[in-house]
Amino acid sequence: MSFEEESFEHTLLVVREVSVYKIPPRTFSGGYKCAEWLQSDKIWSGRIRVVSRNDRCEIRLEDPTSGDLFAACFVYPGQRDVAVEPVLDSSRYFVLKIEDGRGKHAFVGLGFAERNEAFDFNVALSDHDKYVRRELEKESGGGDVAGEESQIDIHPAVNHRLKEGETIRINVKNKISSGSGMLSAAGLTGGHAGTPKPKVLSLAPPPSGAGKIRSPLPPPPNDPVAARIASTSRSTGLKGTNDSVKHSTDSLSDFSQLQKNLPSTATSGSTAASGWAAF
């Protein structure tokens, strides 16, 4: 589509508040510096709108409430540096060449409050330049540029695109998992369908109260606990034997001889007495 067939406007950017300054003449050929601008030189504040209209980009300074146009800057193809010039000492300020539509022009300073707004302003101007360049290439190339851009050139050595009606068959093999450990021994791991399942090991139930052990197992020969119990039982048996021997040899242990020497318990004309009192 050529520029003559287009009659609509395309808004590229809208910033609600910018500031416009009356700037002093350029003192040297290097460029402008916003440090030379004074706060008292601020002449207007309002909204800026960047509009793409055919091959021309319009920077419109408008009143944010009524929409009235304060000034306009026209950027023609290949003349962006003449219409919009960034300052040397800041990225938020620019110098615009405004026109009144009757051949007169003036240079004013434009300032953004935020750095990202100034960045978006530059991007909007660059997008318009790319759009104009594409349209010019389409007109010069007879419309074949769009078709060439949509077609991707691939080297024949790496051209693996499928032809019409061609299919690809993919074989997927299931990986046989070889289980190991307790889960595999218990048959809880899942493997391939063709592999046999391992045998399930079942634990024997605990013994019940009915089945008692008839004969306990003898203790090991070197068990210190069993040796201590055996020595204790032997010492106890020897002590009992010694006590019985001692008891048999003690003269006071047998009272039969003493009882024979005691006087009779019943005598005539005396009071009956018994025990040690009668002795």
Image: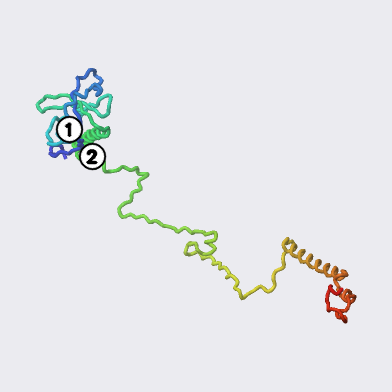
Can residue 246 be seen here? The reply is yes
Q: Which residue is mark 2?
A: 145
Q: Residues within 10 Å of mark 2 (few under 14, many from 20)?
A: some
Q: Residues within 10 Å of mark 1 (few under 14, many from 20)?
A: some
Q: Which secondary structure, mark 1? A: strand
Image point (22%, 17%), residue name: 27
Amino acid carrying mark 2 in the image: Val
Look at the image and tell me in which quarter the C terminus lies.
Answer: bottom right
Q: Is residue 189 left or right of residue 128?
A: right
Q: Is residue 100 left or right of residue 223?
A: left
Q: Which secondary structure, mark 2? A: helix
Q: Position of residue 207 (x, y in %)?
A: 60, 71
* Residue 84 lies in quadrant: top left
* Residue 154 lies in quadrant: top left
* 23 to 159, vertically: above or below: above
Please name whichever residue, 156 or 182, is drawn nearer the observer in this view of the structure: 182
Disc tally is 2
Q: Position of residue 209 (x, y in %)?
A: 61, 74
Image point (14%, 39%), residue name: 8
Image point (11%, 24%), residue name: 104
Q: Is residue 251 left or right of residue 115?
A: right
Look at the image and tell me in which quarter the N terminus lies.
Answer: top left
Amino acid carrying mark 1 in the image: Gly
Q: Position of residue 156 (x, y in %)?
A: 35, 44
Can residue 5 be seen here? The reply is no
Q: Is residue 185 left or right of residue 264?
A: left
Please name whichever residue, 173 or 55, is drawn nearer the observer in this view of the structure: 55
Residue 46's disc number: 1
The residues bearing labels 2 and 1 have C-alpha atoms spaced at a distance of 41 Å
Q: Position of residue 47 (x, y in %)?
A: 18, 34
Residue 34's disc number: none
